[in-house]
Every structure is written in structure tokens, then in C-alpha cells.
Amino acid sequence: MLRSLYDWVIRLAAHPRAIPALAVVSFLESSFFPIPPDVMLVPMVLANRAKAFTIAAVCTVSSVLGGLFGYAIGYYFFATIGDWVVKAYHMEAGLAAFRAGFDEYGTWIILIKGLTPIPYKLVTIASGAAHFDLFTFIWASIVTRGARFYLVAALLWKFGEPIRTFIERRLTLLTWLFLIALIGGFVAFRYLF
């Protein structure tokens, strides 16, 4: 089943509407959607390595725009929508500590957390809820999300076929590692922050 899902995603990655779909996923992931855009980014670059940096650019721009939406949720609607998103991920305690850290380490929190498996949506909502400086939020988001997506795209562009072969041979293991990292990011946020 995993192999057929992988093959379907690879075929979908070559579809003419794949880039707009990636933009939507990147936007939504930065504000409330649980699945990171890497799920689409990786197969799209593997399917068309010549567009690796275009794909990374779309992912970065959409993620930052989605981050602005997450920021707005935290800034204007934290008591309703933002609180609901935080409760949906069971991150109430972690968010309180996270918001407190913004006074002293806001820029570093955005730069570091944007590269890790810790859900970026929680960074964006917390930034807005803490009324963190919007200009700093935008440039830090561009740097951290761009670094993440361009690094993945560059590695796949440079080492595409060996990486594709590696992924296809170890698909089950990599899927489990991805899920562990994703869940680990949520758990780390909840218990460490």
C-alpha cells in the first residue's frame, strides 16, 4: 500500500497543477494544517529536478504568506481561532512558555524553529499572540523557511537519482522516520517549551 501511495504522489508531482497544490499546502501548513509541504516538495523535485529552485521558491513564498495568516490568527483572533488551533494540537502549556520567550529571544525562536520539526504554525500563531514585531517576523520567516526548502531542493537537485533510489529502497523506514520526526516536533513543543 505504501508503494502505491508513493507512486501516486510521484505521478501527482508531475501533474500541471502540482505547483499550485504545493502553494496551497505550504500556505495552510504555516497556519493550521498538520502536514508539512515536504510531503509534496520532495517528490515534485524528484519528478522534475530542472524546476527544483522554482518549486522551493513557491514553497517559501507560500509558507511565508501562510505564516502571515498564522500571525494574524494569533494577533487578532487568538481568543477564538488561535486558541482552537493550539487546543487541537494539545499545545496550551508549550505555547505559554513559547510566548514568554518571545520578549527575549523572538527572532531566534523564529529562525531556529522554522528549520526544525516543531510545527511552524505554532511559531506563527505565537508570534502574533505575542505581538512580535511584524517586520522582523517576515524577514526571519523568509530566511528560515527559504533555508529549509532551498536546502532540500538543492540536495535533491544535486543528488536526485541516488536519493530517489535510496527513498524507493527504504520507503517504509523513511516514512516511519518522517512520522516520528513530525510527531516528535509536536511532543517537543508540548513538553519542552
Image: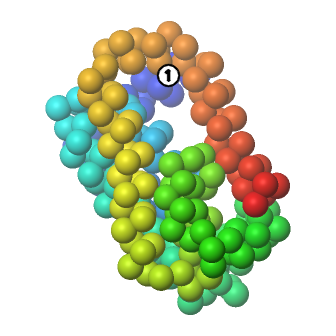
Q: Residue at x 54, y 54 (%)?
A: 112
State the residue in front, 69 or 100: 100
> Which element carries disc 1, helix, strand or loop?
helix
Q: In the rendered view of the protein, which quadrant contains the C terminus?
A: bottom right
Q: Residue at x 60, y 69 (%)?
A: 105
Identify the residue at the far front of this view: 104
- 141 lies above or below 37: below
Task: Estimate the x, y position of residue 95 in percent, counting from the top left.
Answer: 73, 69
- 190 lies above or below 10: below
Which of the 4 quarters of the picture holds residue 38? top left
- 122 lies above or below 154: below
Relative horizontal placement of residue 150, taking residue 74 as reference (left or right)? left
Q: Residue at x 21, y 46 (%)?
A: 54
Residue 60 in sight in this render = yes
Relative horizontal placement of residue 18, taking residue 50 as reference (left or right)? right
Which of the 4 quarters of the picture holds residue 166? top left
State the residue in front, 55 or 118: 118
State the residue in front, 16 or 56: 56
Task: Estimate the x, y position of residue 114 in percent, counting from the top left.
Answer: 51, 55
Label total for image = 1
Which of the 4 quarters of the picture holds residue 154? top left
Judging from the image, the colouring scheme is: rainbow
Mark 1: few/some/many CA within 10 Å (<14, 14-19, 20+)? few
State the residue in front, 184 or 138: 138
Task: Estimate the x, y position of residue 57 in percent, counting from the top left.
Answer: 27, 51
Residue topped by disc 1: 4
Q: In the rendered view of the protein, which quadrant contains the N terminus?
A: top right
Residue 64 in sight in this render = no
At label 1, which amino acid type do we have? Ser
Task: Estimate the x, y position of residue 93 in percent, counting from the top left.
Answer: 82, 68
Q: Residue at x 60, y 87 (%)?
A: 77
